[in-house]
Image: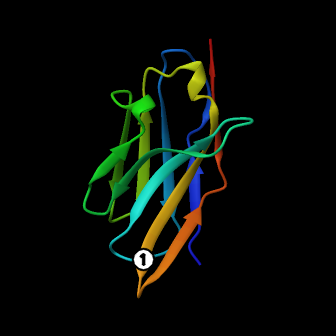
Amino acid sequence: QVQLVESGGGLVQTGESLRLSCAASASIFSFNTMGWYRQAPGKQRELVAKITSDYNTNYADSVKGRFTISRDNVKNTVFLQMSSLKPEDTAVYYCNLHYINRAREYDYWGQGTQVTVSS
């Protein structure tokens, strides 16, 4: 069973930066996608950014140019560098691991880390 351990959330002011990290606790299938989702109070969980094991990335329009996703395949870790933070970025951020093996889909989630941006 894979566990995802997140770190790096916190309280910052508008315009500041934060870096989130998420490490998988066990070896994972070599071709996979790791990503970050977020959920604000009263809203649905939404994709923030994701990156495949061959480094293809995808971002939500709302964070393009401000957030950067990266990964370390040796350490099975994904990072989210968040810059120019806005109050609307306030949410619980969840790490996700997704892969398909032998026609079966696997999805794992971290416990979530709170990001709060004050105005």
Quadrant location, the C terminus = top right
Residue at 44% across, 20% down: 84
Residue 66, can we see it? yes
Picture quadrant where residue 59 is located:
top left
Q: In the rendered view, does 65 fall on the left or right side of 38?
A: left
Please give the name of the residue rendered at 67% of the width and 35% of the height, measured from the top-left corner: 40
Q: In the current view of this chain or complex, which residue is farthest to the right?
A: 42
- Residue 71, compared with residue 65, is above or below; it is below
Q: Position of residue 18 (x, y in %)?
A: 49, 31
Q: Quadrant of the N terminus?
A: bottom right
Label 1: element kind: strand
Q: Which of the pair 22/59 is nearer the observer?
A: 59
Residue 107 location, quadrant = bottom right
User: Left or right of 76: which side holds 47?
Assistant: right
Pointer 1 residue:
100
- Residue 32 locus on image (x, y percent): 38, 68
> Who's the residue at 45% across and 53% down the image?
35
Residue appearing at x 53%, y 20% in the figure: 86
Give the image location of residue 20, x and y in percent.
50, 42
